[in-house]
Image (cartoon, rainbow, N blue to C red):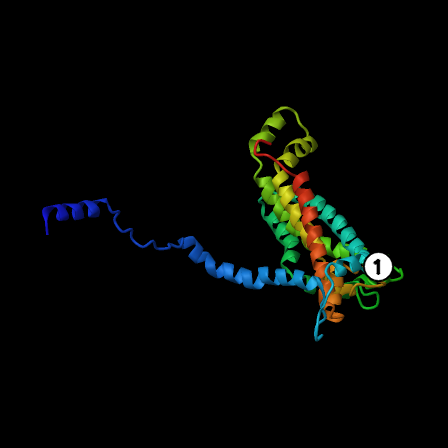
Amino acid sequence: MSASTITGARTASAGRAPASPRRRTRWSPGLLFLAPSLLILGVFVLWPIAQSFYYSLFDWTIGANSQKWLGLGNYVALTQDPHFWNALGVTMVYTVITVVLLVVLGFLVALALQGEGLITRIVRSALFFPTIVSLVSIGLVWKFLLDPQIGLVGGLFDLIGAKPIAFLTDPSLALPSLIFVGVWKSVGFAMIIFVGGLKAVPAERYEAARLDGTSRAQSVWFITLPSIRPTLLFATLILTIQSLQLFDLVYVMTGGGPLFATDSLVNLLYRSGFVDYKTGYAAAISWVLFAIVMIISGIQLRLFRYDDVD
């Protein structure tokens, strides 16, 4: 081999780029740790949600040989269903009254019980106890207590010589009775949320207001409420979503009666899907309820928005 050939080969090899190593995919450790939870979330949450929307587009009936495509037919049928509008009205009335009462009462009770004395902590624990009890258990207890024949409330009416009142079978009293039970159960939850918010307010603000001669009521209005705006947003949002999902108390105490006076949207959904086996119609109700929750939550986030400089 000649010298010129060797020189040319060296020059060619020098100009050739070195072979790049094979790129290996590296997975983030965080994604690997999240993978089991994401898999469970996808299989048991996201996939059923997608399936429910798919069902809502059909006249889907459990046990039928074929499912008829309706498109938005189920949603159109909802607008023409008097039971749907009645259930929507019942749900909204229950939600508005319950949330307002819970926010007001929870805040006032938190103001009175924000100390750390022994008696204060005992009272707080007693008020919070119904929160950890299931709604089904509470509904059964109150159904028994409000029974006009054998209930404790009916017995108290007998003691004072009054006629027992059928709270759960009177169309004008059934829904107020459910509202009372709902508030009784959740007022401790609202109280705990507000107690946490009140303890986060800097004491210097109250000290400065006291030196300026501000009254107790003025301190609450001009210092406490603006300072706990994030807490107020959280409490209102959680309690609203919880109230819009009203079902347990209705199912246990009244079954939606009397005369559909306590028939909530979730109770109508249950009856359509698991009693009448109209899965598509029930799925449409669930998506309407989802839209209502999102709209109301967006409005609340807008009304109670705050900045760090507030």
Q: Is residue 79 left or right of residue 306?
A: right
Q: Quadrant of residue 194?
A: top right
Pinpoint residue 32: horizontal percent, then vertical percent: 42, 57
Q: Is residue 34 left or right of residue 17?
A: right
Label 1 packing within 10 angstroms: few (<14), some (14-19), many (20+): few
Q: Nearer the viewer, residue 269 or 161?
A: 269
Kind of residue at badge 1: Pro
Q: Quadrant of residue 216?
A: top right
Residue 140 visible here = no
Residue 274 visible here = yes
**Taking 205 as reference, is 236 above or below it?**
below
* Residue wearing tag 1: 82
Pinpoint residue 48: horizontal percent, then vertical percent: 61, 63
**Taking 248 as reference, is 3 above or below it?**
above
Q: Nearer the viewer, residue 167 or 307?
A: 307
Name the outermost residue toward the left: 2
Measuring 66% from the left and 62% from the top, which residue is drawn there? Answer: 54
Q: Quadrant of residue 280?
A: bottom right
Pinpoint residue 19: horizontal percent, then vertical percent: 27, 51
Q: Is residue 209 left or right of residue 161?
A: left
Pinpoint residue 173: horizontal percent, then vertical percent: 84, 57
- Looking at the rendered image, the quarter that the C terminus falls into is top right
